[in-house]
Every structure is written in C-alpha cells, then in structure tokens.
Image: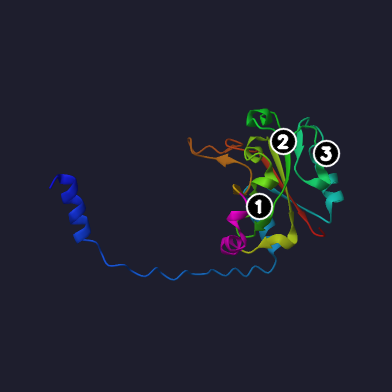
Amino acid sequence: MNSRERILSAVKQNKPELQPLPETTRFQSDYPDLVAKFSEILRFIGGTPVLVADYAEAETYIRQTYSDLPSVVSKVPALQHLATTEWDVLDPHQLETVDLAIIQGVFGVAENSAIWVPEERGGHRVLPFICQHLVLLLNTADLVPNMHDAYERLNISESGFGVFIAGPSKTADIEQALVIGAHGARSLSVVLLQNS
C-alpha cells in the first residue's frame, strides 16, 4: 500500500457520522416605511435617492442632473430616447466611454439599499460597472425588507448573470483614504417610481 492509499484508508476509517443540517433562521425586519429605510441607507453609503411619480418625472430628473454628459446608454424602454450611445455591443471595450447608464432594477432591499439587476436588464454585464455614472430605476412596490426576502424572491434560473448593486463604487483599502469610483460608477442615483 502506497502513501496515498494509506491516507485515503485512514480518512475513510475516521469519517465522522453525518449530522443533520442546522435549521435556517429567518430574520424579520419590520421597517414601518421601506422607501424611507431604503433612502436612508442609500444616502448613508453615498447614493442619491430620488422619489418620483412616474417615468416623465424620472426623465426630468435625469435631464436636469446629467445634461452635460455626451455618452448615455438607456436600457429602460420608457427612457430609450435619452440614449446617445449604442449599448448592444459584443465587445465590452466599446462601452468604456459611457458616461451614464440608465437601467431598470427588478427589486431593492431596504436594509442595505441593494438592487437586483439581472443581465437582461443591464445589457452587457460590464455596463453598470464601466460607466462613470449610474441611474437605477426601481418601483417602490418592488422593495423588500431584507436579504432573506430578497433571496426568496430571487430566481437564479431566470438569468445567466445578475448582481446586487448598492451605492457608488468606493474603497478605502489604501492608507484608509476613501476613493469613489475605483471599481465602478462614481455616482449612483436610484429613481424610485411610485406609480409604475
């Protein structure tokens, strides 16, 4: 018997008995106002919440806030006319000059202001991270209290790729200096639609 066989034999002989899996704990969050909690956390992590009634008000906000940006990509059908740049590209390097990306989120999480964006909503998977500024639209009815609720709602088989996005990109790894936009968008506005 060689050393490999001896090791495997010893492992088999000392194999512990199977133990039942622990029960999963379900955390309940009882925020009285999900929009207020989401907005509070988003502001705290450097994002900008914008509460609007509909897509027309969303367009007004986007035009007023980002009017000086020449390269705009919109993946939101109601705001497609704001796009100045083609987003449907095979080579992600073609998106490196995108100033603003406008994307519709599926649902948001009040406890951390994360928004679920599957690939079919975000276009090329690099788009929300390579743009300079990001606007995510989200219906207020699509807010859930916490990540437990989010994972219950999430259907991974619907999309090949998806990501939770919360706040603008930031890091303070080097010398404890905060750098915004190091690994993604420099700013994030979340336009919360009340009547859509």
Q: Which residue is mark 1?
A: 42
Dot in front, 1 or 2: 2
Query: Residue 149, percent across and down?
Result: 60, 64
Per the picture, the main secondary structure of the magenta-coloured stretch is helix
**The stretch drawn in magenta includes residue 145:** no
Which class describes the residues within 10 Å of circle 1: few (<14), some (14-19), or many (20+)?
Answer: many
Q: Give, as a three-letter code, the residue at label 2.
A: Asp
In the rendered image, the vertical position of residue 64 relative to residue 91, given as above or below: below
Q: Give, as a three-letter code, the residue at label 1.
A: Leu
Q: Which residue is mark 2?
A: 88
Give the spatial CA distance, label 3 vs label 1: 25 Å
In the rendered image, the vertical position of residue 172 relative to residue 194, given as above or below: above
Q: Which residue is mark 3?
A: 82
Magenta region, residue range: 146-159
Which class describes the residues within 10 Å of circle 2: few (<14), some (14-19), or many (20+)?
Answer: few
In the rendered image, the vertical position of residue 24 relative to residue 106, given as above or below: below
Which class describes the residues within 10 Å of circle 3: few (<14), some (14-19), or many (20+)?
Answer: some
Task: Name the residue: 69% across, 33% down.
Answer: 89
